[in-house]
Amino acid sequence: MTSSETVDLRGPPIPKPPVHQQLLNSVPVAVAIYAGVIGVIVYGSFVGAQNMGYNWQWYRVLQYLYSFTDDGFQWGEIMLALPATIQLSVLSFALATVLGLFVALLRLSGLVVGSAVAVGLLELIRNIPLLVLLYLFYYVMGPIFGLDRYVASILTLAVFHSVLISEIFRAGINSVAIGQWEAAKSIGMSTGQAYRYIILPQAVRIMLPPMAGEMVHLIKSSAIVSVIAVAELTTIGRNIISETYMSFEIWFTVAVIYLVVILILSIGVSFLERKYAVDQ
Amino acid sequence: MSSQPIIEARNLDKFFGKFHALKDVSISVRQGERVVVCGPSGSGKSTLIRCFNALESHSSGTLVVDGIEVFEGSKDVRRLRQEVGMVFQQFNLFPHLTVLQNLMIGPMKVRKVSRDQAEETARKYLDRVHIPEQAEKYPAQLSGGQQQRVAIARSLCMETRIMLFDEPTSALDPEMINEVLDVMVELAETGMTMVVVTHEMGFARKVADTMVFMEEGRIVEVAPPEQFFTAPSSDRCRMFLAQILEH
Ligand SMILES: Nc1ncnc2c1ncn2[C@@H]1O[C@H](COP(=O)(O)OP(=O)(O)OP(=O)(O)O)[C@@H](O)[C@H]1O
Ligand SMILES: [Mg+2]
């Protein structure tokens, strides 16, 4: 290939974006704008609160995070509620993953009954609000099957998210090239073995980002179980507020804790993604 | 070469929906025989050999491979596939496993061979395809020719009695074709029963016992190579040969 052809194939060089756009796209400028916007929001709410005569009592919040007593360092009520939220989320997510895999396999099984059941379930759950689903599990299924509020919460979150996770599994499994199935079958593997050793390990890489998104989604929606008073972050926040009337401070604090947990999770996942990418 | 047929297909028909992909195909392959199948694109070559290891199921006719009757829904399909290896145009190596793991997973999971035994076998066949030094790499780190040789070794590790090749060199850069063909010639010399779909006529002349020409879902010509290349009986076959031998 001659050099003139190379130029033709590439087409004319892409013009450099104008200076103001380059500036807007640079990291420091982006961070500055972001900080500015957040600053305005925070400042605005403080001023607004001041104007309605809200009495800020940030100094009283610390005791709910941690304290030093004669016994030494101790976590406060809010921080003690965090493990409850994490436990609730992890258990629900684990169950949702198992259910989601099951529903996805049912859908991919090629059995007419299997995919009909799976699609029916999918549509049913997708179209019921999470709050109503929670009430169904706690107030209806609860008495019938003897579920306590914790179990009802886990089941609600798991069932709700299993539907979304099953779609992630399906997309991941379908993204593995058909040739992988054929190669697996050609060396005599059963469908189950092909899934286990060949298809799922490859699908997992593709599923990792959306699964992380789903975990974030689940942590956030776990707050809803506060309506049936399951002890977790949001419930504890509500309880503290009803004793202290510090609603602004506590809700801000609770929001920041959710934010930090989710940020840590995101960093962990991008680390995992990079690690898998190196393997390839 | 024994005269025992190891693949016996009688009056196979295959439909994809309304499309008639194989039309009344009969063919018999003896143990140790090397059959080369050629023909224009879309003539049903892949479909035919994919029936041999039940990756496709034929719509009618009878097919017996290594004493196992092949039909849709047969319980013996997995037993059959353990006797019939397949090498694909696109290699289809498992990208998440190293070369060695690619070779070991079949024997370990399907044949339930011990890890040590599987590794020993894997290294033996990796040697056989001349890339013992690539054992720890991932497929994506190998050249196309090396990947295809790993794919051949993967099939060999299952100690199959029959090997099917579906255009094993078509996806390769020209300079890598020979390294794969050489391995296949060596394999032929071991007495393996081989059915090879390919347009590499040099290879065909060298190893084929029988040439098969297909067109529009039919087997049009079956002949030993001397006769096939010098005096094909059908015009279509002659034209096809003239076309590909030009290159
Ligand atoms: N899964 C399928 N569904 C529908 N039609 C198919 C399918 N597989 C193959 N066919 C059709 O069957 C015919 C034969 O296909 P086949 O792949 O066997 O041809 P081939 O001889 O191997 O051709 P090539 O040299 O291009 O590989 C083609 O017309 C193809 O379009
Ligand atoms: Mg083909």
Image: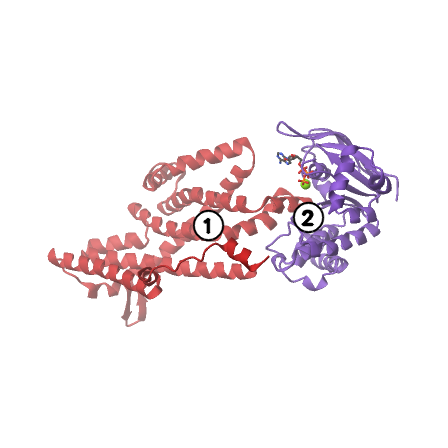
Chain colours: A red, B purple
Q: Nearer the viewer, residue B184 or A10?
A: A10
* Residue A2 in view: yes
Report x, y in % for residue B155: 72, 50
The response on whether ligand 1 sits within 8 Å of label 2 is no
What is the crowding at mark 2: few (fewer than 14 residues within 10 Å), some, or many (at least 20)?
Answer: some
Q: In what quadrant of the picture does the C terminus of chain A appear?
A: bottom right
Q: Mark 2 belongs to which subunit?
A: B
- Residue plotted at (58% across, 48% down): A199
Report x, y in % for residue A112: 54, 31
Secondary structure category for the residue under label 2: loop
Q: Mark 1 belongs to which subunit?
A: A
C-alpha separation, residue under disc 1 versus residue under disc 2:
45 Å
Q: Amino acid at mark 2?
A: Ser
Secondary structure category for the residue under label 1: helix
Q: Amino acid at mark 1?
A: Ala
- Residue plotted at (39% across, 40% down): A146
The quadrant holding residue B217 is: top right
**Is the C-beta separation of discs 1 and 2 under 8 Å?**
no
The quadrant holding residue A56 is: bottom left
What is the crowding at mark 1: few (fewer than 14 residues within 10 Å), some, or many (at least 20)?
Answer: some
Report x, y in % for residue A225: 33, 47
Q: Nearer the viewer, residue A148 or A186?
A: A186
Q: Nearer the viewer, mark 1 or mark 2?
A: 2
Q: In what quadrant of the picture does the N terminus of chain A appear?
A: bottom right
- Which residue does the numbered mark 2 point to in the structure image? B170
In the rendered image of this protein, does residue B230 appear above or below residue A63? above
- Which residue does the numbered mark 1 point to in the structure image? A94
